[in-house]
Each structure stands twice: as C-alpha cells, then as structure tokens.
Image (tube, rainbow, N blue to C red):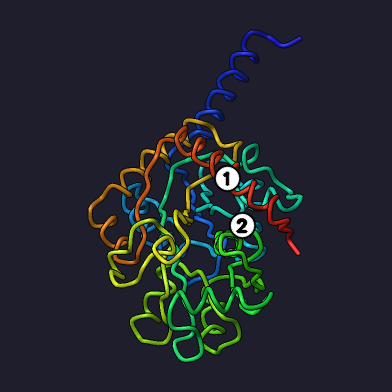
Amino acid sequence: MPTRRSMLIASAAFAGGSAMAQEFPPRKPVTMLVGFAPGGAADAAARLIAKNLADAIGQGVVVENKAGAGGNIAHQQAAQGPADGSLLLLGSIGPLTIAPHMMNLPYDPFRDLAPVSGGVYFPSILVVNAEKGPKTMAEFIALARGKPDAVSFASTGPGSASHLTGELFAKRIGAEMLHVPYRGGSQAMPDLLAGRFTCYFAAPPTALPHIEAGKVLALSTTDLQRMPQLPNVPTVAESGVPGFRALNWYAFVASARTPPAILDRWNEEIVKVLRRPDVRDTLYKHGLTTHPTTRAELNDFMRKESAQWGAIVKERKITSE
C-alpha cells in the first residue's frame, strides 16, 4: 500500500512534470513548419515572423519547409508532432479547409490541430506569359470559353487555394480549364515563363518580381479592390465576373494536444509581432496583409471557409487525382 510520504512525492513529481510540460518558451529550439517550398508567400511570411518571434521570446525559431501533397504533409507532421509548444505550423487554406472535402486525410484539421492565430491574407494575381499569353482579360476569357481545356492553369497542388481559385473562376465564366499541379509557386513560375501552361493564380511574393521584370503579365487580381502595388491591373470582378472574390490565407496552428496555456502564450506573441508596424509594412510590400486574431476568431473563420470551399469542391466534383 502506498504511504502518505510516497503519495506526496508522486504528487510533487506530477506537478513538476505538468509545469514543465507547460513551460514557455520551450527550452529547445522552436520549429515553424511551412507546407511549401522556399520562395513563395508562405515562406516569405514565415521567415519574417519567425525572426521577430525569436527576438521576442529569446529562443531560436527555425523555419522548416516541408513541401508536398499541397501542404498536407506538413499539416500531418504538425498534428502528430510534439505538443510542448516547440512546433508551430503556418497552416494554409488548402489543407485546413479544402483538402478534407476532397480526400481521406490521416488527420482532421478541427480535431488534431488547434488554432493559434491568424497570420496573413492576400489576393491572387492572374498572370500569363508576357510573350505567349493573352494580353487582356477579355482575350483570356474568350480563349477559355473557346473549347474545353484550351486554357491550362497551374496551382500549388490539389486542394490548394490556387487550385480552387482556378476552379471557381472556371465555374463563373462557364469554361473548363486544365489543372496542372505543382509542389509550390517557386516550381510553377519557371514553367509559366517557359510557356508550359497558360496561366497561374499566383501569390503576390511569387508574381510581383516577375511582373516588374516584364516576364509575366498581370491580367487581374482576385480581391474586390485593386492591389495598391498594381493600381492599373483590374480585379476579376471588374473584368466581367461581378462579385468574384477569392482570397488566400495562412494561419498559425499547432497540435491539438498542446496545453491551452501554451497555445494562449503563442497567440499573445504572434499577435504582438503581427501588429508591429515594421512587420506589417514589410509584409504589405509583398502584397500580404497581416491578420492577427484570437484563437476563437480563427476557429470560426476556418469553419466558415471550410463550408464555402466544401460547397465548391462538391459542385465542381473536384478530387485529389
């Protein structure tokens, strides 16, 4: 039979272990997973935010790119990984709210991942090869409507925001466009420059340097307002598709097994970084708008996005193949 002394020792050990499990910041370096290859919007945002988080908490925050399966590999790793606050994921719209409607995933975003804070959002830029592509939205839409699969569009993978934006656009203009998936924007852009497909709904950090260099032509953007960085480029809504809006976004999540106290602390730190004027302005120059939220606000936002894109997946009969 356990003695009173042994019970007190066990109780103290449990309390100490519990406190250590909820220690913040973690004693070991923090990993921030990104589900796409270096060079895209997610990578640009993650590296800036990680640097500022590291300075704020006095602990290393290392960005790890885990590309593949439209970002689902990184999301699975985060769901199954350490739950001590040492692993954050800059989650994306595709794996969190689109892919679950398209395929059987080894994780459930709303069961296995916990919301931490909103990150950034941004419109896509519809870009074509400057030499070989159509020159206006009117030409582009006429080409797409001409015959099935006359237009091919790239994406960062099945179920990604760029994939669903293309599907939504095709639906709205009454056309069929051939989907060409890639592992990330940095892989898709060289093939657009080589003329291997017609267009790409690209993230601003991926597209803007090539637009400025004159290598690709921006036909439109996907928010309801024009991008300040591209004031002469009309929106899709202005170009014959009234009300069209499709935003991309990234948000911070972690394993749902992480203690709530640690998730709350990460929310505090991330929100402080996103509200810093220098961080906000730097991201804005890349076409990204900061989106700090509470954990509850992010949960509500993700559920609304899941319902919206789930309806498009069903209507368009989109699969992972």
Instruction: Please name the residue shown 54% across and 52% down the image.
Output: 93
- SS of the residue under disc 2: helix
Label 2 environment density (alpha carbons within 10 Å; few <14, some 14–19, many ≥20): many
Q: Quadrant of the C terminus?
A: bottom right
Instruction: Please name the residue shown 51% across and 90% down the image.
Output: 132
Q: Nearer the viewer, residue 89 or 138?
A: 138
Q: Quadrant of the N terminus?
A: top right
Q: Position of residue 5 (x, y in %)?
A: 62, 12
**Circle 2: residue type:** Ala
Query: Which residue is outermost to the left?
Result: 277
Q: Which residue is mark 2?
A: 74
Q: Nearer the viewer, residue 215 or 67?
A: 215
Which label was assigned to residue 308? Answer: 1
The reply to whether callout 2 and callout 1 are in contact (CB within 8 Å) is: no
Q: Quadrant of residue 13?
A: top right
**Circle 1: residue type:** Gln
Q: Position of residue 309 (x, y in %)?
A: 60, 49
Instruction: Please name the residue shown 69% across and 51% down the image.
Output: 315
Q: Position of residue 125 (x, y in %)?
A: 44, 69
